[in-house]
Amino acid sequence: MLVKFRPLMATAAKARAPAAVAASMAAAAERDEHVHYKHTDACHHLRWTAKESYEYMYSRPWSRVVDFYADLVRAGGGAAGLAKLFGKDEKDYTLDTTGENYVTTSSEKQTVTISTKDRGGRWERVTFKIVLSYHGGSFDGWQKQPNLNTVQGLIEKHLGQFVDERKAKQLEARSLSIEGCAVVAGRTDKGVTALQQVCSFYTWRKDVKSGDIKHAISEAAPHKLKPLHVSEVTREEYSSTVLENSEHNIKPQSFDVAKVDEILRKLAGKTLSYKMFAHDTHASRSVGPPTECFMFHSRAAVAKLYSANEDYKEDMKVMCVELVANRFLRKMVRVLVATAIREAGAGAGEDALLNLMEATDRRATAPPAPPEGLCLVDVGYEDFSKQRCLIVN
């Protein structure tokens, strides 16, 4: 409503203002009208508005994707469940449960020559690494929040039975429920599925076994939350395909997956500030390293989504986007994907996302894609290996 009435407000002001001021206000109104894009190239008028982007993304058949992720979580295969989408050998993506250790930095490695048995304090507590899958459509996101069904809240409730006596007394004294504390590698939004999420839990109790923790989490939400592996760790270890028909000289109703791939590829191997692709970034953190991410791998490809559900007679053609980075900001992935699709639909150049890095208004990028399509595939603690990527051609 405010945008709709802005020209009327500008016209009224012009009748009372001097000519020079009126011209300035008219120019400002013209800039406001196109503030969502800030582009001057030939495909400017082919870009979807924020509303058009939102409507296009949310009108996709996400229920098929949600069901597909649910099947993966129930199967409990982790990231290996995605391998056959791309003709990969599932063995190459099977979760390694033989030598899972936290990787230390060079500075940390200098201090690990002393055995933990010779140290006291925090060195005596036992830390467990928990790798798990969960179905995004069954939870209100990862982070624990009052009166909401979150993954963290459910896990911490079931970890409460492993809390040491001292911690339990402290919680009781504060009239708090006895729960464990799960520290996650990266929070996920409501609706986002995870196939190999990683969190950690520590306790001072020496009688707790990995199998006990795995069993407790297994009973928390069967078929929706599945622990894949629990291990004790020491403190030292720490092709061009168009999905729909398009018409010329009107706003597109489709996009070229190869074009999306071309646009995303330009992000790989670079450290960039993704503040224009993140939500709720505080002003004090809008510049510099806090918003910088290094993208190891960024690709898009077409795949056929299979389903064990007999109601789905045919496989569905989908676009898969694979992003691997050292970190992700809030809603960054969903905004990146939606914006890349918008730019591909308009026929923008391969530097489209790089150009938007220099924008000064968050509205230059598209609204985030639906969370139902997002899946956290894996969390890495070793050097990046392209061989572990699914889209490599």
Image (cartoon, rainbow, N blue to C red):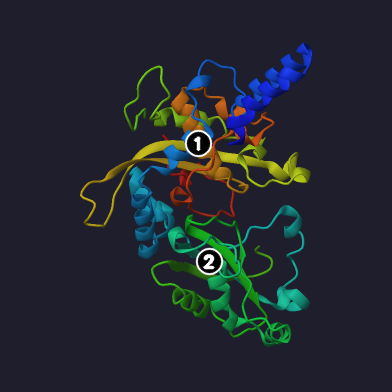
**Residue 168: where, in percent of width, then height?**
67, 85
Q: CA distance from mark 2 to mark 1?
A: 31 Å
**Residue 23: where, in percent of width, then height?**
72, 14
Image: 381 above or below 149 = above
Q: Which residue in the rendered view is the most extreme toward the top?
A: 19
Select label 2 or label 1 by which is in front: 1
Q: Nearer the viewer, residue 325 or 315?
A: 315
Structural crowding at the residue carrying mark 2, measured as other residues with C-alpha within 10 Å and reported as few (<14), some (14–19) or many (≥20): many
**Residue 280: where, in percent of width, then height?**
66, 47
> Could you tell me if residue 154 is visible in this image?
yes
**Which residue shows up at 68% across the image and 58% down it?**
104
Q: Pointer 1: what residue?
A: 51
| Secondary structure of the residue carrying numbered label 2 | helix
Image: 342 above or below 229 = above
Q: Pointer 2: what residue?
A: 151
**Residue 167: where, in percent of width, then height?**
70, 82
